[in-house]
Image: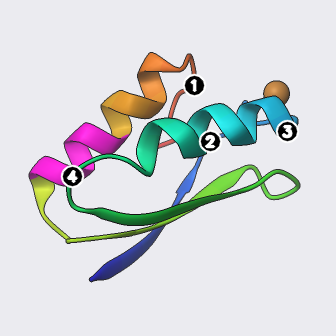
Amino acid sequence: MTQITLSVPDISCGHCKASIEDAVTPLEGVESAVVAIDDRNVSITYDGTDSTMTAIVAAIDEQGYEVAP
Ligand SMILES: [Cu+2]
C-alpha cells in the first residue's frame, strides 16, 4: 500500500469532508481516505497504481473539487 496526501484547497467544512471521503473510499484499490479540513488535504492509502490515482482524482473532481498540482 502507498500513502499520499493530496492538497484540495476548496475543502472548507464537514460537508466537503463527507462528500470527498464517501466518493474516494469505495473506489477499487483504495484502502482509506481521510480529509483534514483545517489542512485542506486528503490522506489516502491506496494500491499505488496510476489507474487508481486517476480514479481518485476523477472522483474528487466529480464532487466539485480540484486537486492542486
Ligand atoms: Cu464544505
Amino acid at circle 4: Glu
Above-or-below relation of 40 to 57: below
Task: Identify the residue under disc 2.
Answer: 8
Above-or-below relation of 13 to 7: above
Q: Earlier in the sequence, mark 2 or mark 4?
A: 2
Q: Secondary structure at mark 3?
A: helix
Residue 48: x and y, percent?
Answer: 20, 71
Residue 31: x and y, percent?
Answer: 37, 69
Name the residue: 72% across, 42% down: 17
Task: Identify the residue under disc 4.
Answer: 28
Residue 41: x and y, percent?
Answer: 66, 54
Circle 4/circle 1 CB separation < 8 Å:
no
* Mark 3 crowdedness (10 Å alpha carbons): few <14, some 14-19, many ≥20: few
**Cα–Cα gap, marks 2 and 4:** 21 Å
**Cα–Cα gap, marks 4 and 1:** 20 Å
Q: Secondary structure at mark 1?
A: loop
